[in-house]
């Protein structure tokens, strides 16, 4: 079988011959014939394609050890099957769980394919490389293996359609769960790929068995819920999870507002902005480990990772952790695709109910402010849309909805204008005047007065309270009326 990049040798010595020749070529290419400690991620190595040597050597193989040592700075790593004292050893159980003395390998999950499935995957790769194998060249299925996979003749399809990625609250592009693992006495570089995750919008009442839970199925949906639209709240089985390392909880909140995942560099920049790269990387690893420990202790699930590394991005496992950010987005999507106003109103109410206050309120996270403003703006738009649907038949409910919006943005003049129009339509001019006075009082505290547009709207409504004239709607209910700057928000408590 010919697959570009795959080399199979009959003996270990032949594999080492090939590896040594590769090292010589790469050393010449990088200009570092003798790698030293100064050659690393800042050198030429990252431009080199990763190469992994897989072998079962004798216990003492100085030649193999020399190849692996030399390859550390030349993107050559190894997976050694069996005892290998010079490196980190992983012990893998029958169900694929790996344990190691190195805490960085905590929770690594291995996956196994039978002979037939492995052959089918290799033939699929071979066909994708433009060298399809004929049916007669396929090996016969091994006893007990399932029937071989066969091509349908149709183009290959992605497991899930890609989704757009936005700062908040985006839906993650569904990706395969890939963990980068060092194993068996080698330099880092080997990777393990698991089956694709279930869709993010999986039904809540559903049992989702996953390999990375250590064989434990999760009945009734995700085991953990994270709420950040308000004060950070972490629950499991309706019990709040308290305590834990502060940075571990902050990491959980940061990932909750990044359903599509975040790179290690982005996490470090947000949580440790003034730390040197090496220090922030160590702190990130510590926070990640403490976060997993916290969630495992709270749920009693010792196998899951809870935070997975996929496509070089850390993200919360959606089969194990639900978030109000994802639920908020799902409700808005449901409203957008609802067939009628009844369904739209119900979905919008579901979304509004999830917003409890400023994102991560009171936590003092420096990175949270722009995400908090985005979330608040979307919540205000949601309440305004609800009021529009309620106004014709239930004006009092529409007013109550706008009052709720005002409690989260008491200086938004557009909301006052909307309230006055509904009050005028109901023949309540005194209520219109009270609303205008309330706005004036609140703005006076900031040294401001209502905009001319707001005063003109009130005058028009008071002139003909039974038939108010509706002005054009600003582009967003969260934008301050007449383009005025938003008053400064008080600093979060620390």
Image (spheres, grey):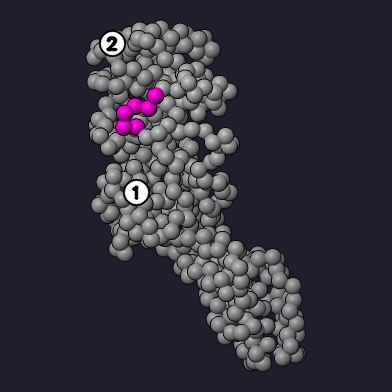
Residue 455 locus on image (x, y percent): 72, 80
Instruction: Please give the label number shown on residue 477.
Output: none
Which of the 4 image quarters holds residue 384? bottom right
Q: 467 left or right of 268?
A: right
- Residue marked by disc 2: 61
The answer to which quarter of the image holds residue 98 is top left
Tell me the chief SS of the magenta region. Answer: loop
Q: Is residue 342 left or right of residue 318?
A: right
Tag 1 secondary structure: loop
**In this view of the protein, can residue 114 be seen by the observer?**
yes
In this view, the residue in front, 277 or 260, is 260
Above or below: residue 444 compared with residue 329: below
Horizontally, residue 492 falls left or right of residue 217, namely: right
The part of the chain drawn in magenta is: 140-145
Q: Is residue 122 above or below residue 253?
A: above
Q: Quadrant of the C terminus?
A: bottom left
> Between disc 1 and disc 2, whose residue precedes?
2
- Tell which of 231 and 339 is nearer to you: 339
Residue 380 falls left or right of residue 290: right
Q: Residue at x 45, y 53 (%)?
A: 256
Q: Position of residue 37 (x, y in %)?
A: 40, 18
Q: Nearer the viewer, mark 1 or mark 2?
A: 1
> CB atoms at circles 1 and 2 under 8 Å apart?
no
Q: Residue at x 54, y 26 (%)?
A: 127
Residue placed under numbered mark 1 in the picture: 209
Relative depth, front residue between 346 and 104? 346
């Amino acid at each position: 079988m010919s697959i570009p990049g795959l080399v199979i040798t009959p003996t270990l010595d032949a594999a080492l011959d090939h590896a040594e020749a590769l090292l010589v070529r790469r050393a010449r290419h990088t200009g570092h014939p003798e790698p030293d400690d100064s050659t690393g991620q800042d050198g030429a190595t990252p431009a080199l394609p990763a190469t992994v040597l897989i072998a079962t050597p004798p216990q003492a193989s100085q030649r193999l050890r020399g190849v692996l040592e030399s390859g550390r700075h030349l993107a050559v790593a190894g997976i050694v099957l069996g005892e290998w004292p010079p490196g980190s050893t992983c012990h893998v159980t029958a169900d694929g769980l790996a344990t190691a003395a190195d805490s960085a390998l905590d929770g690594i999950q291995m996956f196994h394919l039978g002979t037939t499935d492995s052959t089918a995957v290799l033939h699929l790769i071979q066909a994708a490389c433009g060298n399809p194998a004929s049916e007669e060249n396929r090996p016969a299925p091994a006893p007990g293996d399932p029937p071989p996979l066969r091509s349908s003749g149709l183009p290959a399809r992605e497991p899930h359609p890609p989704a757009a990625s936005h700062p908040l609250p985006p839906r993650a592009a569904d990706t395969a769960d890939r963990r980068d693992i060092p194993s068996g006495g080698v330099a880092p570089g080997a990777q393990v790929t698991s089956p694709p995750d279930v869709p993010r919008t999986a039904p809540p009442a559903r049992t989702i068995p996953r390999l990375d839970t250590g064989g434990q199925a999760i009945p009734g949906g995700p085991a953990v819920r994270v709420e950040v639209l308000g004060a950070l709240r972490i629950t499991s089985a309706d019990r709040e999870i308290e305590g834990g390392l502060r940075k571990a909880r902050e990491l959980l909140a940061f990932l909750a507002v990044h359903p599509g995942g975040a790179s290690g560099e982005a996490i470090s920049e947000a949580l440790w902005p003034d730390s040197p790269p090496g220090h922030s990387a160590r702190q990130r690893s510590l926070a990640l480990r403490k976060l997993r420990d916290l969630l495992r202790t709270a749920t009693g699930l010792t196998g899951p990772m809870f935070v997975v590394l996929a496509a070089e991005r850390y993200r919360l496992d959606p089969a194990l952790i639900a978030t109000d950010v994802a639920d908020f987005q799902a409700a808005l999507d449901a409203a957008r695709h609802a067939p009628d106003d009844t369904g739209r109103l119900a979905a919008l109410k579901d979304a509004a109910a999830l917003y409890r206050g400023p994102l991560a309120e009171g936590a003092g996270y420096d990175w949270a402010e722009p995400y908090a403003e985005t979330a608040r703006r979307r919540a205000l738009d949601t309440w305004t849309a609800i009021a529009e649907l309620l106004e014709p038949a239930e004006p009092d409910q529409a007013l109550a909805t706008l009052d709720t919006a005002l409690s989260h943005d008491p200086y938004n003049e557009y909301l006052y204008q909307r309230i006055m129009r509904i009050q005028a339509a109901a023949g309540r001019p005194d209520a219109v005047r009270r609303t205008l006075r309330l706005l004036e009082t609140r703005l006076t505290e900031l040294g401001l007065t209502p905009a001319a547009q707001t005063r003109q709207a009130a005058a028009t409504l008071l002139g003909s309270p039974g038939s108010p004239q509706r002005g054009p709607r600003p582009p967003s209910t969260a934008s301050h009326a007449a383009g005025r700057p938003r008053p400064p928000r008080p600093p979060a408590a620390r």
